Image (cartoon, rainbow, N blue to C red):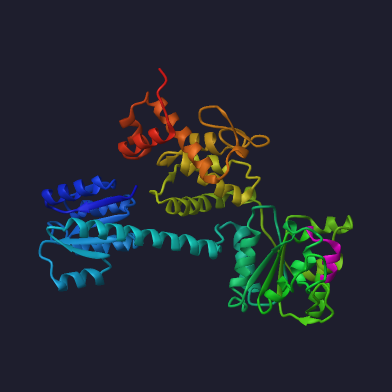
Amino acid sequence: MAKILIIDDERAIRSTLREILEYENYEVEDVDNGIDGLELIRNNNYNVVLCDIKMNRMDGMEVLEQSLALKPDIPFIMISGHGTVETAIEASKKGAFDFISKPPDLNRLLITVRNALDRGTLVTETKVLKRKVSKTREILGESESITRIKETIERVAPTDARVLITGANGSGKELVARWLHERSNRAENALIEVNCAAIPSELIESELFGHEKGSFTSAVKQRIGKFEQANGGTLFLDEIGDMSLSAQAKVLRALQEHKISRVGGEKEIEVNVRVLAATNKDLLKEIELGNFRMDLYHRLNVINIHVPNLTERTEDIPVIAQNFLEEICREYGMPIKKINEAGMKALKSLPWTGNVRELHNMIERLIILSDKVISEQDVIAFANPTGGTNIGSGNESQSTNGNSINYDDFKSFQDYKDQAEKDYIKFKLEKNNWNVSKTADEIDIQRSHLYSKIEKFGLKRLD
């Protein structure tokens, strides 16, 4: 449900606008001055703001400027009983979405609000898509190990030296590779990623070097491999410890001679590629076991960057957790939550077998299931791998009402979120003896919105 804020010092106008918009099923709040309106905007997320221009205490144009400085994506619709072309132009220059004269025409108002909502949705979707396309995050943390990694990247990135990145799953090896590419002289060209563990051994050579039409049964047309796609750029070989020995031999030749041959082809193709590799395995042990070539290891390991486990740099957890907290809350379009000191201490004490990736997932879970301030009890209940809602063994977990949940039962992440939300609301209602007003205040949503959730999930009080 879209959330709209009305800022106007005329009670009659506020009441009229509120009545019209609530009839259209919008969630509406109103305030009679710009200072209070600005404070509401600072602490809440609104989809559209309707703001009068001539007001006491703070002029509407000033509210517009200060609000857009805080949250530049909020569509502002300015309204005034003294509307002129000059006023409309000035409002547009300052960032207003549109301008409506008083008394507002009903149809014009609703069309403008819908257009503003559509524009806000497009802006949000564009930001999400940009984040998905450009996955590179900051390397967060000020620990000695992270500082050393950043310094190494700054020194090594501008060169063409090959880099072997080591570390456990989820520790951030891919992020290091992206930083190396984006700070290199090849940044304008492609970064091509290959997950060697995800490609069957019989297909890895075709994936890396391409193949000619008819070279094997399913080769119905020519295929360009990853080495050629990365020509002039960077090739990132993730989980290279899982690459077959035959493919390793061809990669070694490509690194030595800067030439490749497609599967089924005789022509040699010159390639200019910088190779970065990553692994969660001990390659020296793999060499002893006969699973990895020593000569390839030495070719790849010109520079070694080891990414430590999260438990080895717990002092970085608060800054990483806060970053994830803000990022996820923005994606969900909700006010940014906080983790209190005891909650942060509890997070730092967890084993973090999944490293930074696990921390991201846990913060997302805490945002969904916790109140405005995430406490130590929330961390224990929802994030502790040895209890609460986390996986203990197999695919089972405990929900907030104590019932067993099998994660395989959920077809999508949305299904899981709905179940988690249902359990959370039921838990809070039962805790407050089904006092809807008290529960709505406690979990920071409108009472009408809570009633809608109760109806949606079919929640009923058991006598």
Residue 58 drawn in magenta = no
Which quarter shows the C terminus? top left
- Can the viewer see residue 161? no
Whether 259 is drawn above or below 149: the answer is: below
Residue 121: name its quadrant: bottom left
Task: Pinpoint residue 338: horizontal percent, then vertical percent.
Answer: 43, 45
Residue 122 in sight here: yes
Q: Taking 46 as reference, is 377 left or right?
A: right
Snapshot quadrant of residue 235: bottom right
Magenta-colored span:
242-250
Q: Residue at x 59, y 62 (%)?
A: 147
Toward the top, the furthest residue is 463
Q: Nearer the viewer, residue 248 or 142?
A: 248
Which is more toward the observer, 11 or 376? Answer: 11
**Picture coordinates of residue 221, whole percent (x, y):** 74, 72
Residue ID at (15%, 73%): 85
Along the line of sight, which residue is nearer the eye, 44 or 193?
193
In-front residue for pair 329/220: 220
The spot of residue 86 in percent (x, y) is: 16, 73
Where is residue 447 drawn, in percent x and y? 31, 36
Above or below — where is 381 with respect to 304? above
Decide whether the magenta segment is chiefly helix, strand or loop. Answer: helix
State left or right for residue 331 relative to residue 110: right
Q: Is residue 290 left or right of residue 299?
A: right
